[in-house]
Amino acid sequence: MSDTQWIMYNKDNLFAKILRKEIPADIVFENDRILAFKDIVPKMATHILIIPKNHIISFVDLINGQNNETVGQFFRDIKSVGDHLGLKGYKLEFHVQPEGGQEIPHLHAHLLSDKKLDEEK
């Protein structure tokens, strides 16, 4: 990935293509602000990616570039996904910037169940 992908939003990133329905995804929840879908390489029995529909590159950009209502609404939307899935508890994980393990330059949260795949059976 080029460094420019982390400065300006790249409309051709994988998640942007999923938002435009150019690439299929197993969608579990959607509203006018977010899209939530199953990770294709899950680390736990429930591994959902939650992405905003607006162009935000990373968690840093969310916090630095948005008003408090937008930040709060993103977290309320994440809770809505957990509620929709009937989860009593879960983990939230963010990878921030390439140095933090973020691979796709579009903000996304990982919502994970408390059981590993081999414990779910």
Image (cartoon, helix red, strand yellow):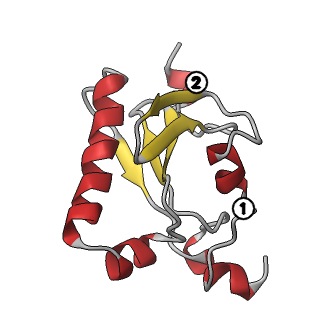
Dot 2: within a 10 Å radius of its alpha carbon, few (fewer than 14), some, or many (20 or more) residues?
A: few
Q: Which comes sooner in the sequence, label 2 or label 1? A: 1
Would you say 40 lies left or right of 57 here? right
Q: Secondary structure at mark 1?
A: loop
Can you say whether 113 is above or below 3 in the image? above
Residue visible at 26% across and 54% down? 73
Q: Which of the two residues, 82 or 55, is positioned nearer the viewer here?
A: 55
Few, some or many residues within 10 Å of mark 1 (<14, 14–19, 20+): few
Give the structural element (helix, strand or loop) at label 2: helix
Name which residue type carries label 1.
Asn
Q: Residue 115, position in %: x, y?
A: 44, 30
Of circles 2 and 1, the one toward us is 1
Which residue is labeled 1 in the image? Answer: 13
Residue in view at x 37 percent, y 80 percent: 65
Look at mark 2 in the image and give the residue it sits on: 118
Q: Is residue 48 visible?
A: no
Where in the figure is residue 116, as x and y percent of width and height? 51, 32
73 is higher (above) or lower (below) than 98: above
Residue 118 higher or lower than 95, as above or below: above
Residue at figure coordinates x 48%, y 48% from the top left:
110
**Quarter location, residue 40:** top right
Residue 101 occupies quadrant:
bottom right
